[in-house]
Structure formats: C-alpha cells, structure tokens
Image (spheres, rainbow, N blue to C red):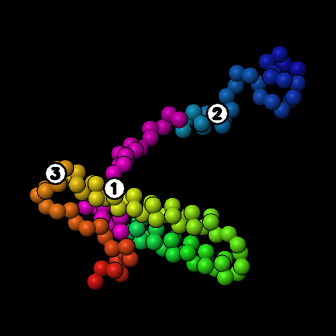
Amino acid sequence: MNYRQASSNPWRRLRGTTTRLQLWQRRLRCRPQPPRPPLRRQPLLDQLPRRLEHEISRIDGRIRELEDECYRLVSEGHGSTLVIRFRIEKMEALRAKLISRYLQQQQNDDGGDNNGGDAPPSPPAAGGAAAVN
C-alpha cells in the first residue's frame, strides 16, 4: 500500500492528483461569462397600463374561480368557507393595492402637484381587453 494513498480503499485516488472532474470544473469556473442583462426593477412607463390591465384581469379571474369554489362547497353542504373567503379578500386587497400604486406613480410623474399639467388617466377596465369598446 502506498503511503500517499488517502485511505485503505484501493479505489480512492491518490492525494495530490487532480481528477478529470476537478479539471473540468476549474475550466468552467475560469471561462468568461456573458454579460448579465441589467436589472429592471420598474417596468417601462409606457408598458405600465397594459401590464396593470393584465394583472387586474388575472386577479379578477382568480376571484371568480374562488367565488365559484365557495358556492360549490356551500351547495355540497360543507360548513365553513372562511378560508376561501379570506383568499378572496386578499386578492381584492391586492387588486386595490395595484391600482393605488398605479395612481401614485402617475401622480409622481405629473410632478406631485394636485392640479398638475395633465390629469392622470383612469386605471384600465377590470374586465381586460374585452371591456374596452
């Protein structure tokens, strides 16, 4: 048995030697990485109404699904629907929060004064693109 061997297991590699896996991992670490795209935390302002409309319609759809589930459970005779009602309230609160953030963003863009240059547009209709006639 060689004194440089790591253990009594004959299948273990000798200390001091580099395995092919280690060489490959080292090669991958040293490879130049492509530049990462810059972080965009805020969406572009021209995309904000369209994104808001999409999110509101998604939330409204989820609220309708939860209400349907609640009605189904009541009709089947299940006693408590408090959990589903709580979820509905949370989704409605999220919807209101999105709209208030949008209005606040519009007010900040106008310069913060209440009688600012142009009035902020109303938030998009809740029904999505179908509500816009």
* Label 3 – label 1 distance at C-alpha: 17 Å
Which residue is denoted by mark 1 in the rendering? 101
Q: Callout 1: helix, strand or loop?
A: helix
Residue assigned mark 3 = 113
List the single residue furthest toward the front: 79
Q: Residue 22 carries which label?
A: 2
Quadrant including the C terminus: bottom left
Residue 91: image location, x then y, percent: 49, 64
Q: In which quarter of the image is residue 107?
A: bottom left
Splitting the image into 4 quarters, where does residue 72 fall?
bottom right
Residue at 17%, 54% (x, y): give it.
114
**Image depth: mark 2 or mark 1 in front:** 1
Q: Is the magenta stretch mostly helix, strand or loop?
A: loop
Q: Give the range drawn in magenta.
A: 29-53
Q: Residue 112: where, in percent of width, then height?
A: 19, 50
Between 39 and 122, the one lying in front of the other is 122
Using residue 34 as the reference point, say whether residue 62 is left or right of it: right
Label 3 Cα crowd, 10 Å radius (few <14 / some 14-19 / many 20+) = few
Residue 67 placement, left or right of 95: right
